[in-house]
Amino acid sequence: MATVDEVGRSEQGHQSDARRKHDHSLERNALGFWDAIVMAVAGSAPAYSIAATTALIVGAVGFGAPAALLWCGIPMMGIAVAYHHLNKLGASAGAAYEWVGRVLHPILGFFTGWGLIVSATIFMVAGSIPAGQVTLSLFSSSAASHAGWVTLVGAVWFLVMAYFVARGVRITANAQWIMSSIEVVLLVIFGLLGLFHHHRISFSMSWLGFGHFGSFSGFVSGALIAAFYYWGWDVSSNLGEETEESHKNSGIGGIVGVLIVFLLFELFTICINMTMAPSAIQSNSSNVLEAYGRVIGGGFGSKLMIIAVALSTIATLETTLIQVTRSLFAMAREKTLPKQFGVLHPGWNTPVFATAVVAVVSLVFFGLAQFVGSVGTVLSDAISSIGLQIAIYYALAGFAAVIAFRRLLLKSVSNFLLMGLFPLLGAAFMTFIFIKSIPGLSAVVLWIGLGGMAAGFIPIIYYYLKGSAYLHQRPTLGSVLPEEEFAGDVARIE
C-alpha cells in the first residue's frame, strides 16, 4: 500500500516525465530544506511588514494589534498546513494554481494563480517605494523625502533583484541567506532589548483578547491588515519544482516560516505598544521600526533598524518576483497565459521573459504611483487591496486541501485535525474576512482589489476558446488518487 508521501513522489515523477518533453525545465534539486525555510521567512518580510504596517493596524484596532496578529495567525497556520499536504500531490511552480484547478475547478485554479500575480504586482509597486526611502534615509533624511530620488533608488534595487531572480534560484537563495539572516538577528536582538527597556505602559493580557477591537468591523479591519503581514511565506511552494524532496520540504518550510514570523510579529507589536505612544506610531507610519530603534538604542539603534527594514524590503521584492514569475511560467505551460511566459533561459533555467515583463510593468506602475497621492496613501490602499486578493486565493487553497484528502479525515484524530479541521478553519476565516471587509473599504481599494481579480476573465475566456486543456479539465483528483492509494501508514503524514 502506498502512503501519501509515496503518492506525492509518484505524482512528481509523472509530472517530471511530462515536463521532460519541453526543451528544458526549471533547475531540479537546487534548494534544500533550510533554503525553503529561509525563502518562506523572506517572503513574509518581517521587518518590512512591521515597519510599514504597524501604524495601519494600530490605527485600526489600537492596542488590539497583537490580538489581530494572533487571531489571524492561527488560521494562517491552517493554510500553511493545507499547503504542506497539497505539496504531496506533486510539485508545481504554480503551486495552489495547479492544486486548486485539479481539486475544485480549473476556473477557481486560474483565479488562485491570477490572484497571486495581481497581488504580487501591486506589492512590487508598493514595496519599491520603501526600498528607496529606507536606503536613502541611511544617508540623508531630506533625500528620503524626495519623490524623484526615492523612485530612482527603489527602481535600482528592484532591477538588481530582478537580475538575481533571472540568473537562477541558487543565486537568489544565497542572497536571501545573507539578507534574511542579518535581518532576523537584528530583529531578535532589538525585540529582546525592547522587553527589558523602560516601558511607557506595562503589557496586558487584554492585548491578546477581543476587548480592543471596538466593534465587529474593527476586528475585520485588523484581520485584513494582519493577513498582509503574513503573506508571502508560500513562495516555498512555488519553488517546489526546484526543491529536493519538495513533497516534504516545501510544505514544512512554509509552516516553519509562518511560525517564525508569527513570533517576531507578536514580539515587536507588543514591544512597540509598551514603548511608543499611539501618536508617535502614527507620526512615524512610513517606518515605525526606525522610530522604535531610536527609542531602544538612540541614533545607532535607529540606523540598525533601517538596515533591517532595507534588507527585508529588498529580500521580499526578490521573493515576490520569484512567486509571480514562477506562476506565470506554470500558467503559460498550461496554456492559460501567453506561451512566451513559459520560455526559459537555456543556461539559467529561469523564466527570463516573464521576469523582464514583470520588471517593466512594475517599474511603469511604480513611476505612476508617485503622482497619485502620498506615500502613506499608496501603501494603505495597496495593503488593503492585496489583503482582499490574499484572502481569496488562500481560502481556495484551504478548501482544496480538505476536499483532496477528505477520504483520510476519519482515519485518525491527527488526520481529522491537521488535514481537515485546521485547513478548513483557515479557509473559512479567509472567506469570512473577505466578505465582511468589503463594505468598509474605499472605492479605490475595491477597484484595485476586485477589479484586478475581475480582469482575469479576459485570459480565461480567450484561452478557453483556444482550447486550453487546463481550462477544459474536470476535477479528477478523487478518481486519480482514490482512497486505496492513500491507505497504509497514514501516521507518516507530517
Image (spheres, rainbow, N blue to C red):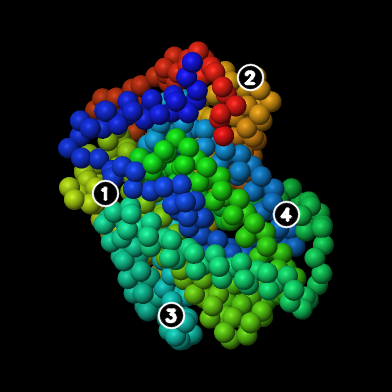
Mark 1, other Cα within 10 Å: few <14 / some 14–19 / many ≥20: many
Which of label 3 and label 2 is nearer to you?
A: 2
At x 64% / y 42%, what residue is drawn? 75
Residue 388 visible within the image = no
Q: Is residue 411 above or below residue 146?
A: above
Residue behind mark 4: 67
At x 43% / y 70%, what residue is drawn? 131
Residue behind mark 1: 350
Residue 54 visible within the image = yes
Which of label 4 and label 2 is nearer to you?
A: 2
Describe the element under mark 4 as helix, strand or loop: helix
At x 53% / y 17%, what residue is drawn? 487
Describe the element under mark 1 as helix, strand or loop: loop
Label 2 and label 1: CA atoms lie apart by: 41 Å
Residue behind mark 3: 136
Q: Amino acid at mark 4?
A: Ala
* Residue 246 drawn at (x, y percent): 42, 39
Label 4 and label 1: CA atoms lie apart by: 41 Å
Mark 2, other Cα within 10 Å: few <14 / some 14–19 / many ≥20: few
Residue behind mark 2: 411
Residue 37 placement, left or right of 152: right
Describe the element under mark 3 as helix, strand or loop: helix
Label 4 and label 2: CA atoms lie apart by: 34 Å
Q: Quadrant of residue 147?
A: bottom left
Label 4 and label 3: CA atoms lie apart by: 34 Å
Q: For this rendering, which residue is in front, 121 or 274?
A: 274
Q: Amino acid at mark 2?
A: Lys
* Residue 486 drawn at (x, y percent): 51, 19
Pointer 1 or 3: first along the chain: 3
